[in-house]
């Protein structure tokens, strides 16, 4: 479904529910808010959900379904410049997946563990043995040993805001795919995000509504 298909579907349901209208600009804002919330929910599953009452916590990395959904937003091997052991996070950073120095894993520690790691007689921070550590705050990463100058980061970025682009034809807005920005999500996620948006707007619908609309688009082309 293109962003125009999603918009038409929303208009159709709003009309059926006699809930007024929905301007394209308002639709964009509502849908973009819903997709951000959806991504937050996926990321929020990290160590917040368990496999059962007595099961272990399910982390993001172990959940292949969630990783697959988030795959359009994963940036790999982003080069970080490290100065005096500190590197800022990329501007579009949302969530860290992996961090390496010279191809070797860099292990996360807490600030409370800095002293014990530095004084370790087994695996202290050392470039000679490729033993690297880092701790994270809201602005960036601090590395041990502080002599590190570069690192490679795998991380998740925010989804791009969708845009329902248009041109003016006979005084009215007509959808223009050339100036539109499409959703980056897979089809199932697009449906879920649209359902969330409609629910937020107070529009009632059945699960079959989305499927029936998709079949209508395939048959009629509109």
Image (cartoon, rainbow, N blue to C red):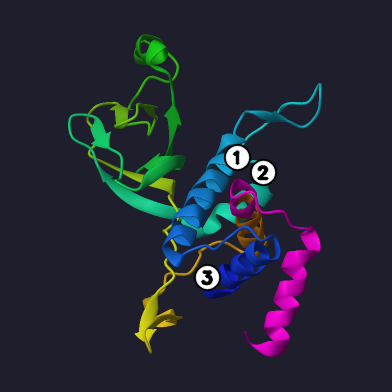
Q: Quadrant of the C terminus?
A: bottom right
Q: How many marks?
A: 3
Q: Which of the pair 129/183 is nearer the observer?
A: 183
- Look at mark 3 in the image and give the residue it sits on: 3
Q: Nearer the viewer, residue 213 or 121?
A: 213
User: Dot 3: what SS?
Assistant: helix
Judge the density around disc 1: few (<14), some (14-19), many (≥20) Cα neighbours within 10 Å: some
Q: Residue at x 76, y 69 (%)?
A: 211
Which residues are the magenta region? 197-222
Residue position marked by numbered label 1 in the rendering: 60
Q: Position of residue 78 (x, y in %)?
A: 34, 51
Query: Does residue 40 appear left or right of residue 217 in this picture?
Result: left
The picture quadrant where one finds residue 114 is: top left
The span from disc 2 to disc 3 (Cα, nearest Å) is 28 Å
Determine whether label 2 and label 3 are within 8 Å by CB: no
* Marks 2 and 3, the one that precedes in the sequence: 3
Local crowd size for mark 3, using a 10 Å CA cut-off: few (<14), some (14–19), many (≥20): many
Picture quadrant of residue 209 = bottom right
Counting from the top left corner in percent of width and height, residue 16 is at: 70, 65
Q: Could you tell me which quadrant the N terminus lies in? A: bottom right
Residue 81 on image: x %, y %:
23, 43
Marks 2,1: beta carbons within 8 A: yes
What is the residue that sits farthest to the left in this orientation? 84
N-terminal label among 1 and 3: 3
In the image, is 41 to the left or to the right of 169?
Answer: right
Quarter of image, res 198: bottom right
- Residue 23 belongs to magenta span: no
């Amino acid at each position: 479904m293109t962003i125009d298909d999603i918009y038409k579907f929303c208009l159709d349901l709003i009309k059926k529910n006699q809930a007024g209208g929905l301007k394209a600009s308002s639709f964009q804002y509502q849908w973009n808010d819903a997709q951000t919330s959806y991504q937050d929910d996926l990321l929020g599953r990290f160590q917040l959900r368990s496999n059962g009452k007595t099961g272990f916590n399910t982390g993001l990395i172990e959940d292949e379904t969630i990783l697959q959904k988030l795959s359009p937003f994963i940036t790999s091997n982003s080069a970080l410049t490290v100065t005096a052991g500190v590197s800022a996070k990329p501007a579009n950073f949302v969530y860290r997946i992996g961090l390496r120095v010279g191809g070797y894993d860099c292990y996360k520690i807490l600030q409370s563990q800095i002293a014990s790691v530095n004084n370790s007689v087994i695996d202290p921070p050392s470039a000679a043995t490729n033993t690297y550590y880092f701790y994270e705050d809201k602005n960036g990463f601090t590395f041990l040993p502080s002599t590190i100058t570069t690192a490679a980061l795998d991380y998740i970025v925010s989804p791009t805001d969708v845009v329902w682009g248009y041109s003016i034809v006979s005084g009215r807005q007509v959808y223009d795919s050339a100036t539109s920005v499409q959703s980056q999500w897979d089809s199932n996620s697009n449906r879920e995000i649209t359902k969330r948006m409609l629910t937020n707007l107070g529009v009632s619908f059945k699960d079959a509504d989305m499927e029936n609309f998709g079949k209508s688009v395939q048959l009629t082309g509109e």
